[in-house]
């Protein structure tokens, strides 16, 4: 999967949020708040293809976390991003 075109991470008053900026997302009227870790993952994958295992690897590289815990957390992030419609 990868981040859908037209979604950007922005810093608004110290909060990391995902906003729709492209015309293709004109019907998307939400702001999605990300914690520091989710924002790190979003920035790390950029426009590259990724899966839960790639996110888990990034978590293990950046944080002292057990690989199984990292994978479970990464799968949760992928599910949330998919439900929000910001990845494809």
Image: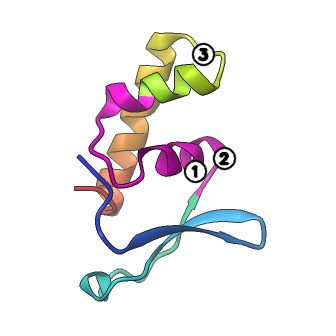
Q: CA distance from mark 2 to mark 1?
A: 5 Å
Asked if marks 2 and 3 touch (Cβ < 8 Å), the reply is no
Q: 74 above or below 19?
A: above
Q: The residue tagged with tag 2: helix, strand or loop?
A: helix
Quarter of the image for the C terminus: give it: bottom left
Question: Looking at the picture, how far across and down is residue 83, in whole percent?
Answer: 31, 55
Q: Residue at x 35, y 61 (%)?
A: 84
Asked if marks 1 and 3 touch (Cβ < 8 Å), the reply is no
Q: Nearer the viewer, residue 80 or 52?
A: 52
Majority secondary structure of magenta residues? helix
Q: 34 above or below 78?
A: below
Q: Residue at x 52, y 73 (%)?
A: 31
Q: Residue at x 30, y 69 (%)?
A: 5
Neighbor class of circle 1 (other Cα within 10 Å; few <14, some 14-19, many 20+) is: some
Q: Which mark is residue 36?
A: 2
**Residue at the disc numbered 1:** 39
Asked if marks 2 and 1 touch (Cβ < 8 Å), the reply is yes
Earlier in the chain: of badge 2 and badge 3, it is: 2
Where residue 40 sits, quadrant-wise, is top right
Q: The residue tagged with tag 3: helix, strand or loop?
A: loop
Magenta segment, which residues?
34-55
Earlier in the chain: of badge 1 and badge 3, it is: 1
Neighbor class of circle 2 (other Cα within 10 Å; few <14, some 14-19, many 20+) is: few
Neighbor class of circle 3 (other Cα within 10 Å; few <14, some 14-19, many 20+) is: few
Left or right: 88, with 61 as reference point: left
Left or right: 68, with 66 as reference point: left
Q: CA distance from mark 1 to mark 3?
A: 17 Å
Residue 66 in magenta? Answer: no
**Residue at the disc numbered 3:** 65
Question: Looking at the picture, how far across and down is residue 80, in whole percent?
Answer: 39, 49
Where residue 77 sits, quadrant-wise, is top left
């Amino acid at each position: 999967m990868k981040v859908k075109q037209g979604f950007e991470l922005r810093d608004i008053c110290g909060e990391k949020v995902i906003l729709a900026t492209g015309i293709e997302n004109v019907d998307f009227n939400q702001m999605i708040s990300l914690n520091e870790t989710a924002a790190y993952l979003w920035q790390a994958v950029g426009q590259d293809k990724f899966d839960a295992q790639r996110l888990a690897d990034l978590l293990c590289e950046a944080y002292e976390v057990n690989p199984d815990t990292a994978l479970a957390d990464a799968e949760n992030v992928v599910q949330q991003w998919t439900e929000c419609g910001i990845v494809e």
